[in-house]
Image (spheres, helix red, strand yellow):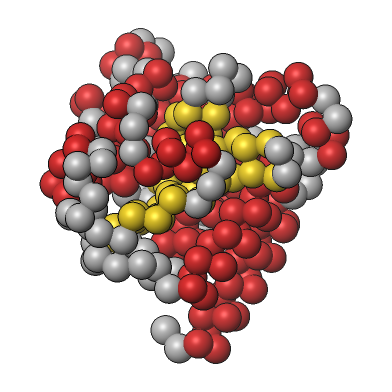
């Protein structure tokens, strides 16, 4: 990708993030857009976001790969790693060569290297004195992330953070906690919906998330609402979905499905969500 095209796509990325900063925007969709932009436009192989819940504990809410998700969950379990340190110190943490610093966080290093990850760059999602999570960039190659990409990643993270910490939530701490907790609760429903789609459409977990997001965007509705309808069996998505007509794009009566117990797709955000068939099921690129 040449510099001109990259610059144009970065401008589009900022415009897309800005478009989400309206009343009723979907926090999960905002953060997923952020990590996908980082993956597509920066010199990184995967990106993920850890968001603090109402109790201040971090949880994985967006990711571009299962490997990234696994490494982040391992840090949460061990309460140690560059992303955890980034959140605790509110400072950027750069780990250009995991092998060199393997003794610093041995469990993290072992898991990351096993997934082919050799360098990490963690950026706090913060505004003034408020820190709500971290943006984590992972690379398969060793070495520092270049300066231009660091600046772009920080700017994208800042826009997303400002979007979440709007003035009305800054003025009311309880509103902020409710908003963030709602986003984390929505993640549970989305993970359940991914399991439903993976089962009924016979597709992998990551493809299931793509179908759900495609449907939500085509129908101009939130991921959370589509997920709730899928889990309630009020909606069914096939392995290939594309509305043929304007009428088809917003059906009045979704296809009914027989009830099914939700226990088939267990979820626990305490130590990362678990998707269909017990696999960690977060969005993938």
Residue at 72 percent of width and 58 percent of height: 18
How far across and down, in percent of the image, does residue 202 sit? Answer: 25, 38
Examine the rendered structure and indicate whether residue 130 appears above or below residue 43: above
Residue at 68 percent of width and 23 percent of height: 177
From this viewpoint, is residue 242 visible?
Answer: no
The answer to whether residue 40 is left or right of residue 110 is: right
Examine the rendered structure and indicate whether residue 2 appears above or below residue 250: below
Residue at 73 percent of width and 44 percent of height: 128
How far across and down, in percent of the image, does residue 47 sit? Answer: 40, 53
From this viewpoint, is residue 145 visible?
Answer: yes
The answer to whether residue 96 is left or right of residue 31 is: left
Examine the rendered structure and indicate whether residue 80 appears above or below residue 97: above
Image label count: 0
Q: Quadrant of residue 274?
A: top left
The answer to which of 90 and 151 lies nearer the viewer is 90
The answer to which of 45 and 246 lies nearer the viewer is 45
How far across and down, in percent of the image, does residue 19 sit? Answer: 72, 57
The answer to whether residue 135 is left or right of residue 22 is: left
Residue at 51 percent of width and 80 percent of height: 6
Examine the rendered structure and indicate whether residue 172 appears above or below residue 41: above
The answer to which of 82 and 18 lies nearer the viewer is 82
Quadrant that contains the C terminus: bottom left
How far across and down, in percent of the image, does residue 16 sit? Answer: 65, 61
Quadrant that contains the N terminus: bottom left
The answer to whether residue 184 is left or right of residue 250 is: left
């Amino acid at each position: 990708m040449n510099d001109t095209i990259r610059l144009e796509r970065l401008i589009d990325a900022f415009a897309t993030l800005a478009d989400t900063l309206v009343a009723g925007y979907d926090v999960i969709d905002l953060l997923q857009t952020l990590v996908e932009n980082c993956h597509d436009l920066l010199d990184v192989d995967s990106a993920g976001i850890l968001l603090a819940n109402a109790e201040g504990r971090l949880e994985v809410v967006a990711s571009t790969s299962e490997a990234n998700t696994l490494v982040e969950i391992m840090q949460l379990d061990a309460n140690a790693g560059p992303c955890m340190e980034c959140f605790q110190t509110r400072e950027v943490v750069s780990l250009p060569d995991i092998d060199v610093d393997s003794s610093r966080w041995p469990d993290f290093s072992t898991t990351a290297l096993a997934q082919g990850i050799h360098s990490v760059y963690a950026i706090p999602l913060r505004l003034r004195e408020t820190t709500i999570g971290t943006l984590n960039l992972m690379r398969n190659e060793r070495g520092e992330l270049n300066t231009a990409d660091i600046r772009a990643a920080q700017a994208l993270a800042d826009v997303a953070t400002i979007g979440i910490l709007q003035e009305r939530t800054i003025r009311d701490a309880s509103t902020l906690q409710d908003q963030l907790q709602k986003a984390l609760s929505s993640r549970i429903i989305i993970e359940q919906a991914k399991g439903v789609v993976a089962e009924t459409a016979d597709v992998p977990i990551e493809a299931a998330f793509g179908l759900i997001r495609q449907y939500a965007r085509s129908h101009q509705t939130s991921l959370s609402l589509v997920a709730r309808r899928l889990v309630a069996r009020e909606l069914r998505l096939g392995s290939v979905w594309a509305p043929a007509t304007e009428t088809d794009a917003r059906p009045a009566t979704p296809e009914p499905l027989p009830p099914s117990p939700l226990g088939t797709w267990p979820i626990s955000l305490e130590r990362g969500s678990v998707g269909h068939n017990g696999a960690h099921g977060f969005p993938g690129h």
